[in-house]
Image (cartoon, rainbow, N blue to C red):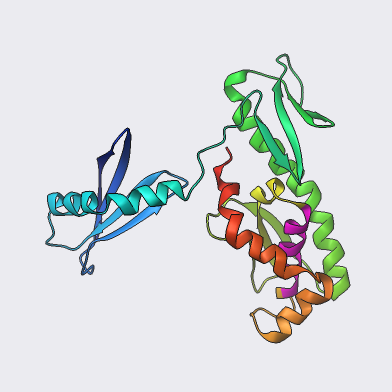
């Protein structure tokens, strides 16, 4: 059984939470940086004290600072903030009053209480993503002559899309913040799994048949995909 406690580490002007988890089968101290939650996760062996763990974290301060520098700062969905929507820069504009969010060229007009702006923008982005991804999935499924059971949106930190044996597909809603070809690649990837639920050569040939330049999109996600998690 594991237990968790929270502590903090001071790194100059930065104070970072450390979630310490003690695990009986762990043999060494393990540190991980969780960018989305902006905290350090630490796993301690059974007989290692919290002080020893914190001393170890301080000794690894350069590693921690490097992790912070490798991840972008959070980008809030607030008035005046520019965000990319399928490759087009749009400015979020709070307009007050009542009504639904609308888009006018390169502006997204957000009515309602300013305190709820971030939540409303995220909901609107998810809806926009669904309106885009569903017909795209249907188009690619028709090309490969496969059946899609269900399409859902998620916000997984390490997975842009998934497919299961039942024919259910899921996608990260954050792909709405990427270029259109990135979403196209992920859709082609998951739809191809409906024929080949593996990553064999035959699978990649299927992907290439409906997404000829898939490698460029895959490489972009490997290098820059983490930036999509900075929003919201």
Residue ID at (13%, 59%): 48
In the rendered view, tell whether residue 222 sits above or below residue 210.
above
In the rendered view, tell whether residue 99 sits above or below residue 199.
above
Q: Is residue 119 left or right of residue 91?
A: left
Res. 72 visible in picture:
yes
Rendered image quadrant of residue 169 = bottom right
Asked whether 83 or 197 is in front, the reply is 83
Q: Quadrant of the N terminus?
A: bottom left
Expressed as whole percent of the image width and height from the top left, the position of residue 202 reads: 73, 85
Q: Quadrant of the C terminus?
A: top right
Residue ID at (20%, 65%): 24
Res. 101 visible in picture:
no
Q: Specify the segment rendered in magenta.
A: 180-192
Residue ID at (53%, 54%): 157
Expressed as whole percent of the image width and height from the top left, the position of residue 208 reads: 79, 75
Rendered image quadrant of residue 152 = bottom right
Expressed as whole percent of the image width and height from the top left, the position of residue 204 reads: 72, 79
Our reading of the magenta stretch's main secondary structure is helix
Q: Is residue 74 left or right of residue 85?
A: left
Residue ID at (70%, 74%): 193
- The answer to if 64 sits in the magenta stretch is no
- The answer to if 183 sits in the magenta stretch is yes
Q: Is residue 28 left or right of residue 207?
A: left
Which residue is most to the bottom?
201
Expressed as whole percent of the image width and height from the top left, the position of residue 9 reads: 26, 41
In the rendered view, tell whether residue 96 sits above or below residue 159.
above
Asked whether 74 or 121 is in front, the reply is 74
């Amino acid at each position: 059984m594991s237990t968790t406690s929270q502590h903090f580490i001071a790194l100059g002007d930065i104070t970072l939470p450390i979630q310490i988890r003690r695990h009986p089968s762990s043999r060494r101290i393990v540190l991980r940086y969780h960018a989305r939650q902006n905290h350090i996760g630490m796993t301690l062996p059974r007989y290692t004290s919290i002080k020893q763990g914190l001393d170890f974290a301080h000794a690894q301060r350069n590693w921690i600072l490097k992790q912070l520098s490798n991840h972008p700062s959070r980008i809030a969905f607030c008035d005046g903030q520019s965000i990319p929507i399928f490759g087009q820069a749009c400015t979020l504009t709070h307009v007050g009053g009542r009504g639904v969010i609308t888009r006018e060229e390169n502006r997204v007009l957000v009515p309602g209480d300013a305190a709820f702006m971030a939540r409303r923008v995220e909901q609107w982005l998810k809806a926009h993503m669904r309106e885009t991804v569903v017909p795209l999935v249907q188009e690619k499924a028709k090309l490969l002559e496969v059946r899609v059971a269900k399409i859902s949106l998620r916000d997984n930190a390490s997975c842009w899309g998934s497919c299961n044996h039942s024919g259910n597909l899921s996608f990260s809603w954050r792909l709405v913040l990427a270029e259109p070809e990135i979403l196209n690649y992920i859709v082609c990837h998951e739809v191809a799994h409906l024929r080949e639920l593996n990553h064999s050569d035959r699978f990649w040939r299927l992907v290439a048949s409906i997404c000829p330049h898939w490698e460029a999109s895959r490489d972009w996600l490997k290098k820059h995909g983490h930036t999509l998690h900075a929003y919201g």
